[in-house]
Image: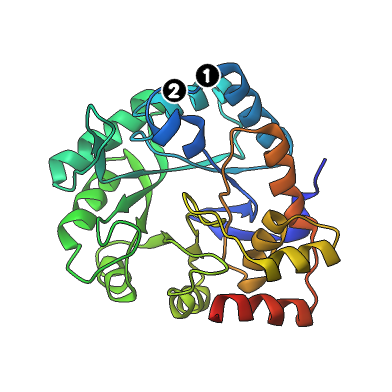
Amino acid sequence: MPTLSAAGTFPLADRTVNRMGYGAMQLAGPGVFGPPKDRAAAIAVLREAVESGVDHIDTSDFYGPHVTNQIIREALHPYPDSLTIVTKVGAVRGGDGAWIPALEPADLERGVQDNLRNLGLDVLDVVNVRIVGKVHGPSEGSIETQVAALAELQRRGLVRHVGLSNVTSTQVAEAQRITPIVCVQNQYNLVQREDDALVDELAGKGIAYVPFFPLGGFSPIQSSALSRIAEGLSATPRQVALAWLLHRAPNILLIAGTSSPDHLRENLKAAELVLPDATMAELDAIGRA
């Protein structure tokens, strides 16, 4: 069984979690829509993740929609006291699987209520508000209305902590003037490095940075240099790409997702991979290229 503690821990809200977590998006059907082909296998992956030491799961009720949260509830409820579940609001799904922005205060409250119901919870640990931006990249603009709406739900006791997704440094600062922000979830990986400065800024403030698509998402990272480095370390390219993130900054929390038990074990073993300084320099060069 992988030793997740090798990657260390970091504060997330009022808890300290292992830096290697799990993202539940791939538990839904193709295109993150509808049920999975094998629900029993999805349940087994979740249970193995928690048994292996994962204490941070990322999800959303618009995965499926509803499907992923219902699977999490079936697999893990009643939840271990040590488990932190982070969800997100800000979108709904169309009948054709389209991702439709839902960022008005009433939309966000409905999203919170959907997450509570399908996860079987009375209060959500952390809720990220997902800003539309440029789909997988942020764009400037005020997010005061959205953050204030979540802060009101926090005041009402439905949400413990607030996070942000797909945002800029300016938007983080705006949000912090309204309520404490405990994490930021943006696209970032070995070859998508636009957030380098934000990662470091948040590290200085003790705020967790949670990269989505840490392995490239719908366009997996492919690099002959990465494959060569991985071979030299007796590891897989996936493991090296995840280990690079863990070495990149101490506030990075990983939520690599999979519906495959084999891929789960492969991902979790990245926590044990040590990257020498020279190897980190080689990997950094891939991103610059």
Point out the residue furthest to the front here: 224
Q: Which numbered tag is attached to residue 70?
A: 2
Relative to 94, is 204 above or below? below
Q: Which mark is residue 74?
A: 1
Where in the figure is residue 120, as x and y percent of width and height?
42, 23
- Which residue occupies 13% across, 47% down? 104
Residue 252 position (above or below residue 80): below
Q: Look at 50% across and 63% down and name the residue there.
A: 208
State the colouring used for the structure image. rainbow
Q: Residues within 10 Å of mark 1 (few under 14, many from 20)?
A: some
Q: Secondary structure at mark 1?
A: helix
Residue 50 percent across, percent down from the top left:
66, 35
Closest to the observer, 26 or 231: 231
Pointers 1 and 2 in contact (CB under 8 A)? yes
Figure quadrant of residue 9: bottom right
> Which three-letter amino acid code belongs to the residue tagged 2?
Gln
